[in-house]
Amino acid sequence: MAIHLPSLAELRNIQQELKRFEHRVQIILIVVFVCFGLLLARLVFLQVVRHDELAEQAENNRTAVLPVVPPRGSILDRNGVVLASNYSAYTLEITPSQVRNVEATIDQLAEIIDIQPRDRKRFKRLREESKSFDSLPIRNRLSDEEVARFTAQRYRFPGVEIKARLFRQYPYGELASHVIGYIGRINIRDKERLEETDEIGNYRGTEYIGKLGVEQGYERELHGLTGVQEIETSAGGRAVRRLAHRPATPGQNVVLSIDIKLQKLIEDLLGDRRGALVAIDPRSGEVLAFVSKPTFDPNLFVDGIDIENWQMLNESVDKPLLNRALRGTYPPGSTYKPFMAMAALQTGKRNASTVIMDNGSWTYGGHTFRSHGDHGLGAVDMERSIVKSSNVYYYSLANEMGVDLIHDQMKPFGFGQFTGIDLPGEVRGILPSTEWKRNYYKRPEQQKWYGGETISLGIGQGYNTFTMLQLATATATLANGGLRHTPRVVTATQDAITHQPLPVALTAPLDLGLKPEHVAVIRKGLVGVATEGTSARVFAGAGYTSAGKTGTAQAVSIGQKDKYNAAKLSEYQRDHALYMAFAPAEDPRIALAVIVENAGFGAAHAAPIARRVFDYWLLDQYPSEEDIEATQKGQTAAPIGTPRKARDIRLGTP
């Protein structure tokens, strides 16, 4: 058998193939080494360079950090009566970003849960104001039966769930609503404000914030501190176990200086009339009552007020949303005269014995300014000018003083100034001066101050417009001998758990430097009003001596040749009835200012309310039902019927 030996050419081919194979192997080895190098570099990058970042991401995938919303603090009156608190209830909520068709889902939910048109409207509004991933309530306060019905069909509704939430409640409804305020859902404006103050982090998971009154003014104290809960989750996002927990700090309770029983009495005495009353302890500045009528029910705002109720409140001619005590401005009328008399004494323009002839009118620049009716009071000194309320006396005094001196003397009493009360939204009003007029008007002919404009300032008319809070503060200052305390409605905060009170910090009172002998002159005149003057019938038989001044302020201008006739005017054009007073006159413990809008004479409509407030505070007397009803109609002077013991009166079950 012949043996075949490879030729030289074949051997060369084999060697070339071997070389090519070795070359390929080398390339493969290089690629392998490069790949391993890249893997090693990536491993070092991930395990060393980005270790902390990736470890955090891994931990975040394994855990979830949830906010723990703090319970909101309660609001209490000075005697511990709860005026605002929380209760727990179930809500049915939808997260729009997790639902394909929101409207269709709501229709399906309505088959098993009662969903009213107002619920749909509120949800639509909330959805417009919120982000798509926010959980929004479509129904609040579910019954146990409704919870059970939904739970049985939960699988049909992805993106819909039941949550247990704390709801705010105001057990006495409309009572003291302007001072208590209310809470509402956090809107875009609220979020911007929280971001500006760097507080947004403390509102994670929180949907509500104070919107008015104490709820707004003491939001930080009432809200508390948000807690944190860290939980371990499964791959499906279910909670497995709790890893860490920092409990929320409950909001503090807020204790008011308001006596809610006195507040209710005053609101009842005003009845359906429009008006305001502020009562202050002149020794401390504590506000004892802060009344504005008509009122509103703050519970309407907790879930988001519906359109019908909002229109009813917002469009009402009686303006129930207006806080008349804080933001309503009125001419003070004759209640301004005691302060004008004090200014005359302090500046030396007049002394107590200076006599002015009151002939029933006073003429300046050919213009006649009338006094009360068509008759004069004859010779009038300072005390008699207050007791008999002489217009002529104060027309001439205003002319002697001039607008700027009047301004400088009235400003320290707080007229036309912010009082500094611990409630948001206070307005300044107008205490006129030549500078004020230059700044207020734009046209040169309007900016000039005319001497005739000064005359009516003396009787609390003209450009003068003040709040009842300012008039009450000025009255309390006068009662306190010239020491002006900053009014406040909150006396202390209180730990929600231990109930340990923490008094609020007080500011030192401002000493106006009133001379005691001047204060005595004004006090004597004011006592005369209540004993022999315009409010004598109202305070007949009172077990204390009070000092006060009635006032009647024009709501519209009446020509000098025309006589005021309420019967010929529409209700909203009639005069306002005012009264300022303090008691006991010799050692004042309460001072107040009250206005009844478009009611007429202060002695007939405002002073009777003041009398019953003093009886309550000083004598522990609560008027009879027939007396309250008659006072609402302006048909009483001194109390009628047998008064009840105030301590025995119950507000009723909230």
Image (spheres, grey):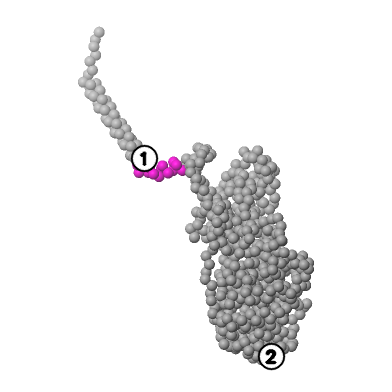
Give the answer, above or below, for where 211 lies relative to 574. Answer: above
Residue 610 magenta-drawn?
no
Q: Nearer the viewer, residue 416 or 176?
A: 176
The rendered magenta stretch, by its main secondary structure, is classed as helix
What range is drawn magenta here?
Answer: 47-60
In terms of image quadrants, where is residue 438? bottom right
Which residue is rendered at x = 71% and y = 90% of the image? Answer: 378
Residue position marked by numbered label 2 in the rendering: 379
Q: Can residue 175 be seen here?
A: yes
Identify the residue shown where x is 65% and y is 72%: 592
Task: Determine the residue positioned at 72% across, 84% down.
Answer: 372
The C terminus lies in quadrant: bottom right
Q: Amino acid at mark 2?
A: Ala
Residue 372 numbered tag: none
Res 182 quadrant in image: bottom right
Estimate the x, y position of residue 113 in percent, counting from the top left.
68, 45
In the displayed structure, would residue 435 be above or below residue 143?
A: below
> Left or right: where does residue 161 sit relative to residue 560?
left
Residue matched to label 1: 47
**Left or right relative to 401: residue 594:** right
Q: Residues within 10 Å of mark 2 (few under 14, many from 20)?
A: some
Tell me which corner region of the image, top left, top right, bottom left or bottom right, holds residue 325: bottom right
The residue carrying pointer 1 sits among few (fewer than 14), some (14 to 19) or many (20 or more) residues within 10 Å by Cα, namely few
User: Seen in the image, is 492 located left or right of residue 547?
Assistant: left
Task: Give the label, 1 or 2, closer to the camera.
Answer: 2
Instruction: Kindly identify the amino acid type of the residue bearing the numbered disc 1.
Output: Gln
